[in-house]
Image: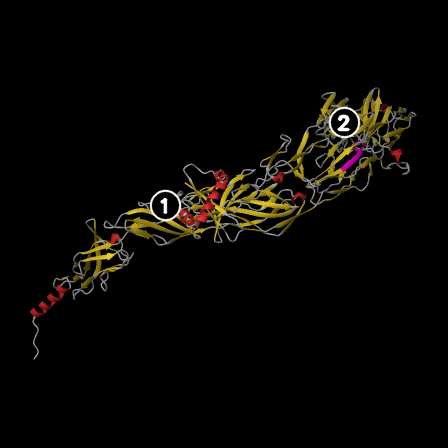
């Protein structure tokens, strides 16, 4: 029979179970229980604070959380950061790594939809000695940067206090102790145990450990690894061989990969076994710097041939590239001419050939001229007027218009980076070509250049009025004539007659004879033929023409009747005409059928000369029955005068009233500003010529008379400017003795040619000293034939200018050694100074260190002496330590190190440890190079006294003898008062027999 369970029985059972689990339960709510109210756990252990949740069956989902009492406040605990559990499935609080600050009071909570319940308070106590917590186990630090190794010391009130904090570094087997006295660090104290290293170098790479000393022992942190990012530079050259043209720039490429970045670059050149150091301050070079390690040679010459290596340095150390070789090709130019004598026709264009072969390419080409071994010369370049060529593109010299003033000896000069070469001289002779008929070519000297020669008939010529007459003129001119005209002199009045004059034929270069159509009595007079060529103007002797009047058989009618005979109406009776322009004399005829006009002609009365103008007269039109007006196409002074129009009819001749033509214009008027000029040799000078002309001038030339020899100078002449209608003045470029003489200015217009008064020109100074136009220097090395040209702006130098001719080398190095000469150039020529030999006293540093090994006791300071002698001054000093095939760089930034600077090259190691034993090398650098001192051996022992005590009595006696025997050497070590000397001797089987004494100096 089954007994029915009562409600009272169930309640009693639940009470018993809940009491056993320490569960506070309210019927109808979730329940929270704990295993025990307090825990005591060890520091660093895994701790579980047990908690049980019994949900209300009606609300099975329960949210679990924990709180901790901190400063009287309940603070919720978040899951993570070493805290686990706190879920409905596992409501207990799990602390993975218990620390002292985890001690305290905790409460477990459960929350469902209707209420929140909590456990009783649980007390947790963490016990143990002080501990060191490491924030990060590995640091990667860029060389030269700072780093902080972060740690914290965990402790509670019950623990013994921390008395001291220090660190140790294991660097390639060398152990350094770092405490509060160590320089260049911060932190490392009880208040701040973290270690900050201000400048990290390879000496600080390794394993760091933090130590905290307390009354019961020493806490040790986990190892912290510091890895220094950086190494000596990786240096290489791009090519193993370079080839460059003499005088060009060449760049020898150096590729540097470095971390940390490089701080210095220099190059080494080996030529004939001699080493030369090249740095960024060396003259004639660019680059060789941290930003541009490649080496650019400016204007390379034969002196730059050699084997080159690139050196690069960063704070870690120095590296060197492989070798590369530089070859230089090229030399001074080769300059030749085609002949030693060159004949040219006056007025022709003549070219003096200059053939150039040059590697490197020319950078300047010019010519020089001298006359009959005259010491003075004239420089000719492409800027000189009257010539072309004389340039790099066209080295030959072309004289556009040859005249006797161009005669002389011409030499072609070609300059490239290797030097200057002069050609053999070419003698230019200006001769006339055989222009005249009947002159045999084998008699060229009958055709010497001169003003034209003219010949006319000298006997008087008498003709009747109305007839045509020709005045013969023959011309012999070399060079050919450029202008022909005639001049008539009647009663001291001169009239210019040109081919354009009315009723005139001839008077041209091709037909110089003058033909006058229908001559009148008024045309009688003395006629002179005038001809001009580029040399000058020639005049014939006068020939006489007499025109006699013939009695007129035509009878004129009596007074005319306006109703019967033609009448001539004149529109205007006075005209003012500009010389050379056209004019129309307007008339009209009134006539009738009974007495029609049969013919029209005109007559001109010009200074007593009467000229008849009809339909056959050239240079006019109109002048007919249909158009009685007279149009003159080109008015000259021959057309100035009184004009009358005539009309022939059946009963006689009708005439108009007088019409006057006034010609505006005359021969040029020439004025000079002064009659005497003087100029300094080589300067430019202007001989002023002021021309007033109406009509305007069309041509200008000058005449120079020197030693009774006349010379024509026109716009095409070499070495002059001006001589144009716009600027008739004569500008002589770079005057020399050859320009001394008397000068006249000539100007021509349509009317004729006028000449100025004479002007004299002199050159001041018997032997002139013209102004300097260029300054440069050149340098030779070891009597080599090749030179280096140094101009203004040359890298690494200043001066070498006209204003500052001296040469300043900004930073002298052995690369500047050589023989220097200053060169000054002016219009006369080039002069070089005496040679100056420059020797730059410089060498790589001399590093002097004692060779005696040092043995010291651990914990004392020790100084490794180093003395550096350097010209120029050293720029860097550092040390290397070799230990167990490991090399460490030690500089002024390294920990536990002092000195290792330019001013104090010796190295002082603070609190030396056994691991610092090794071979030390002092290294010094200057702009010339790097030197390494001899190795110094340092032995650091735990205790020198123990070693001495372990020696035998016999050894002790030997030690004493050795000490007394070496007292002088000991004194030389400079022992300080208050210090002590520990000496120890022993026999070494691996060396020659004898006793070796090792002494250490300590404070």
Highlighted magenta segment, given as a residue range: 400-411
Q: Residues within 10 Å of mark 1 (few under 14, many from 20)?
A: some
Choose the circle earlier in sequence order: 1 or 2.
1
Q: Quadrant of residue 87?
A: bottom left
Label 2 neighbour load within 10 Å: few <14, some 14-19, many 20+? some
Give above or below for 717 relative to 296. above
Could you tell me residue 542's position as x and y percent? 87, 24
SS of the residue under disc 1 = loop
Residue lying farthest to the top in this orientation: 491
Q: Give 54 or 423, whichever is nearer the viewer.
A: 54
Which color mode does the image show? secondary structure
Q: Secondary structure at mark 2?
A: helix
Quadrant of the image for the C terminus? Answer: top left
List the residue tagged with mark 1. Answer: 179
Name above or below for residue 973 compared with residue 169. above
Q: Choose between 697 and 951: the one closer to the eye.
A: 951
Where residue 166 appears, as percent x and y from the top left, is 35, 47
Left or right relative to 127: residue 178:
right
Question: Residue 636: percent from the left, percent from the top?
Answer: 77, 28
> What residue does disc 2 label?
737
Q: Nearer the viewer, residue 373 or 661?
A: 373
């Amino acid at each position: 029979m089954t007994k029915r369970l009562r409600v009272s029985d169930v309640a009693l059972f639940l009470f018993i179970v809940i009491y056993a689990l320490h569960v506070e339960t309210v019927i109808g709510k979730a329940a929270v229980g704990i295993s025990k109210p307090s825990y005591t756990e060890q520091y660093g252990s895994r701790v579980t604070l047990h908690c049980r949740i019994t949900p209300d069956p009606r609300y099975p989902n329960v949210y679990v959380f924990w709180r901790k009492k901190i400063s009287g406040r309940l603070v919720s605990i978040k899951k993570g950061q070493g805290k686990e559990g706190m879920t409905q499935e596992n409501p207990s609080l799990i602390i993975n790594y218990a620390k002292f600050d985890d001690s305290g009071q905790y409460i477990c909570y459960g929350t469902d939809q209707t209420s929140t319940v909590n456990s009783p308070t649980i007390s947790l106590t963490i016990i143990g000695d002080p501990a060191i917590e490491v924030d990060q186990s590995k640091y990667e630090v860029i060389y030269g940067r700072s780093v902080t190794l972060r740690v914290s010391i965990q402790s509670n009130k019950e623990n013994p206090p921390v008395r001291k904090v220090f660190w140790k570094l294991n660097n390639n087997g060398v152990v350094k102790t770092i405490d509060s006295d160590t320089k260049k660090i911060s932190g490392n104290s009880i208040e701040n145990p973290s270690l900050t290293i201000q400048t990290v170098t390879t000496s600080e790479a390794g394993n760091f450990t933090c130590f905290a000393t307390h009354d019961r022992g020493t806490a040790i942190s986990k190892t912290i690894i510091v890895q220094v990012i950086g190494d000596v530079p990786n240096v290489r050259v791009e090519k193993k061989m370079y080839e460059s043209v003499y005088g060009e720039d060449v760049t020898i490429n150096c590729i540097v990969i470095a971390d940390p970045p490089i701080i210095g670059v220099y190059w080494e050149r080996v030529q004939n076994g001699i080493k030369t150091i090249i740095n960024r301050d060396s003259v004639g070079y660019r680059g060789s710097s941290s930003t541009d390690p490649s080496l650019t040679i400016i204007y390379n010459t034969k002196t730059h041939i050699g084997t080159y290596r690139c050196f690069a340095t960063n704070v870690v150390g120095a590296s060197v590239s492989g070798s590369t070789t530089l070859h230089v090709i090229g030399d001074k130019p080769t300059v030749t001419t085609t002949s030693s004598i060159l004949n040219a026709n006056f007025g022709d264009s003549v070219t003096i050939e200059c053939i150039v072969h040059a590697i490197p390419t020319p950078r300047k080409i010019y010519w020089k001229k001298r006359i009959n071994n005259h010491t003075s010369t004239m420089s000719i370049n492409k800027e000189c007027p009257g010539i072309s060529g004389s340039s790099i593109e066209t080295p030959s010299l072309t004289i556009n218009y040859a005249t006797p003033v161009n005669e002389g000896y011409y030499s072609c000069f070609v300059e490239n980076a290797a030097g200057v070469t002069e050609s053999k001289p070419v003698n230019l002779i200006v001769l006339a070509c055989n222009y005249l008929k009947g002159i045999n070519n084998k008699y060229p000297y009958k055709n010497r250049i001169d003003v034209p020669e003219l010949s006319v008939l000298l006997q008087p010529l008498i003709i009747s009025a109305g007839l045509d007459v020709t005045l013969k003129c023959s011309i012999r001119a070399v060079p050919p004539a450029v202008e022909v005209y005639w001049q008539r002199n009647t009663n001291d009045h001169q009239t210019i007659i040109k081919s354009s004059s009315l009723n005139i034929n001839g008077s041209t270069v091709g037909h110089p004879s003058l033909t006058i159509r229908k001559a009148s009595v008024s045309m009688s007079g003395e006629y002179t033929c005038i001809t001009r060529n580029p040399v000058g103007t020639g005049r014939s002797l006068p020939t006489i023409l007499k025109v006699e009047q013939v009695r007129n058989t035509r009878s004129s009618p009596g007074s005319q009747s306006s109703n019967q005979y033609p009448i001539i109406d004149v529109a205007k009776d006075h005209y003012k005409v500009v010389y050379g322009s056209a004019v129309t004399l307007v008339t009209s005829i009134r006539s009738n059928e009974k007495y029609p006009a049969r013919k029209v002609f005109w007559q001109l009365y010009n200074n007593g000369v009467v000229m008849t103008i009809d339909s056959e007269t050239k240079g006019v039109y109109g002048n007919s029955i249909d158009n009685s007006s007279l149009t003159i196409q080109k008015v000259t002074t021959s057309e100035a005068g009184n004009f009358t129009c005539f009309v022939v009819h059946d009963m006689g001749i009708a005439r108009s009233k007088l019409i006057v033509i006034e010609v505006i214009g005359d021969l040029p008027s020439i004025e000079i500003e002064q009659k005497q000029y003087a100029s300094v040799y080589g300067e430019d000078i202007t001989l002023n010529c002021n021309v007033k002309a109406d009509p305007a001038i069309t041509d200008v030339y000058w005449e120079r008379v020197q030693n009774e020899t006349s010379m024509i100078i026109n716009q095409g002449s070499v070495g002059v400017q001006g001589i144009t209608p716009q600027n008739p003045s004569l500008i002589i470029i770079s005057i020399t003795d050859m320009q001394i003489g008397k000068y006249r200015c000539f100007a021509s217009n349509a009317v004729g040619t006028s000449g100025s008064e004479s002007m004299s020109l002199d050159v001041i100074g018997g032997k002139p000293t013209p102004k300097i136009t260029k300054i440069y220097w050149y340098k030779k090395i070891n009597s080599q034939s090749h030179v280096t040209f140094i101009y203004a702006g040359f890298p690494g130098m200043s001066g070498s200018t006209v204003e500052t001719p001296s040469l300043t080398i900004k930073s002298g190095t052995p690369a500047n050694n050589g023989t220097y000469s200053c060169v000054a150039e002016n219009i006369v020529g080039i002069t070089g100074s005496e040679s100056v030999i420059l020797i730059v006293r410089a060498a790589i540093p001399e590093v002097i260190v004692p060779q005696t090994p040092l043995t010291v006791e651990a914990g004392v300071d020790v100084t490794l002496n180093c003395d550096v002698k350097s010209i120029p001054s050293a720029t860097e000093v550092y040390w290397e330590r070799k230990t167990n095939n490991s090399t460490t760089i030690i500089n002024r930034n390294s920990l536990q190190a002092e000195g290792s600077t330019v001013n104090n090259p010796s190295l002082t190691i603070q609190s030396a440890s056994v691991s610092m034993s090794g071979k030390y090398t002092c290294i010094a650098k200057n702009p010339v190079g790097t030197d390494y001192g001899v190795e110094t051996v340092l032995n650091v022992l735990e205790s020198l006294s123990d070693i001495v005590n372990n020696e035998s009595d016999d050894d002790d006696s030997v030690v004493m003898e050795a000490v007394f025997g070496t007292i002088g050497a000991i004194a030389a070590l400079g022992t300080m008062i208050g210090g002590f000397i520990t000496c120890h001797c022993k026999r070494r089987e691996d060396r020659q027999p004898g006793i070796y004494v090792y002494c250490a100096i300590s404070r």
